[in-house]
Image: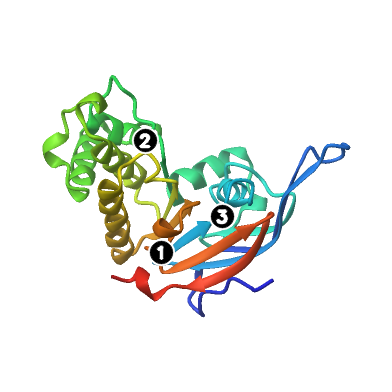
């Protein structure tokens, strides 16, 4: 199995022999992930691709610190996550990782501005600063004029842009996107992928989880998962456009 080494730049994400076993110690234990070595440098745009059951969602959950590994190690922006307790993991997720999901996960009664500003409340940022930073984040994704609209008043692509602005509000170095174009038409999906490329160019590390080869082709590197293992690490020059 090839090693997923990007280059000699300092990695923002690095795993060594990462594994995950569910229902450990029972007859029904399932090995969801095994022996994954992965290195992602700051400013990379990486797609993790594979069919359902390949282990890509398990890997995403481990990278996002939403779950803990059974084996191996994971370093996130230089921090060994195994050394952190639950509270410290929550702080790491808030400060280091922005999440974007297929279903947008916007609160329907809140405006776009309020949805984007919401994470700042958990970080105890003063209200005036929350509003200003949320306005700036919406402007950065091209939605400054939609700040007062609720999700039902926005298109699918606009809702996903709001979700991306919310993911970026704490200025995390890593953006983790799980099937972000899955609920969008192809034209709108292309617009969202172009936005990810621009964020990459601005210095964000973008990790895209997908089952779609056409979506993965937009990334600079494609990591192919099969049966819980990393089988290929492809440099994809077409991702830089």
Q: Is 134 or 201 nearer to us in this picture?
A: 201
Q: Which mark is residue 50?
A: 3
Residue 81 appears in view: yes
Picture coordinates of residue 217, whole percent (x, y): 41, 64
Q: Quadrant of residue 180?
A: top left
Marks 1/3 in contact by CB < 8 Å: the verdict is no
Q: Which residue is found at the position 88% from the left and 37% from the top?
A: 27
Q: Secondary structure at mark 1?
A: loop
User: What residue sits right under mark 2 in the picture?
Assistant: 104
Picture coordinates of residue 205, whole percent (x, y): 41, 61
Quadrant showing the C terminus: bottom left
Measured in 3D between alpha carbons, the distance from the residue under mark 1 to the one under mark 3, in whole angstroms, is 13 Å
Q: Which residue is found at the position 56% from the left and 70% from the top?
A: 233
Q: Residues within 10 Å of mark 2 (few under 14, many from 20)?
A: many
Q: Residues within 10 Å of mark 3 (few under 14, many from 20)?
A: many
Along the polypeptide, which appears first: circle 2 or circle 1?
2
Q: Secondary structure at mark 3?
A: loop
Measured in 3D between alpha carbons, the distance from the residue under mark 2 to the one under mark 3, in whole angstroms, is 22 Å
Q: In the rendered view, would you say 170 is above or below 195? A: above
Furthest toward the top, the residue is 109
Measured in 3D between alpha carbons, the distance from the residue under mark 2 to the one under mark 1, in whole angstroms, is 22 Å
Q: Which residue is found at the position 40% from the left and 34% from the top?
A: 103
Q: Residues within 10 Å of mark 1 (few under 14, many from 20)?
A: some
Quadrant showing the N terminus: bottom right
Along the polypeptide, which appears first: circle 1 or circle 3?
3
User: What residue sits right under mark 1 in the picture?
Assistant: 217
Along the polypeptide, which appears first: circle 2 or circle 3?
3
Marks 2/1 in contact by CB < 8 Å: the verdict is no
């Amino acid at each position: 199995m090839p090693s997923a080494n990007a280059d000699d730049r300092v990695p923002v994400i690095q795993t060594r022999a990462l594994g995950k076993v569910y229902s450990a110690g029972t007859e029904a234990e399932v090995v969801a992930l095994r022996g994954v070595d992965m290195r992602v440098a700051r400013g990379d745009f990486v797609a993790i691709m594979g069919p359902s059951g390949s282990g890509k969602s398990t890997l995403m959950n481990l990278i996002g610190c939403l779950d803990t590994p059974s084996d191996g190690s994971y370093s996130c922006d230089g921090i060994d996550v195994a050394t952190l307790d639950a509270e410290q993991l929550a702080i790491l997720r808030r400060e280091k990782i922005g999440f974007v999901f297929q279903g947008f996960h916007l609160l329907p009664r809140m405006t776009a501005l309020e949805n984007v500003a919401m994470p700042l409340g958990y970080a105890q940022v003063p209200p005036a600063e929350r509003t200003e930073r949320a306005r700036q984040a919406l402007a950065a994704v091209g939605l400054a004029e939609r700040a007062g609209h609720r999700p039902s008043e926005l298109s699918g692509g606009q809702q996903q842009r709001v979700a991306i602005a919310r993911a970026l509000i704490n200025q995390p170095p890593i953006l983790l996107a799980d099937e972000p174009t899955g609920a969008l038409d192809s034209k709108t999906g292309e617009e969202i992928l172009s936005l990810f490329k621009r964020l990459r160019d601005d210095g964000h590390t973008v990790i895209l989880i997908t089952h779609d080869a056409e979506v993965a082709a937009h990334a600079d590197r494609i990591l192919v998962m099969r049966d819980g293992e990393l089988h290929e690490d492809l440099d994809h020059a077409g991702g830089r456009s």
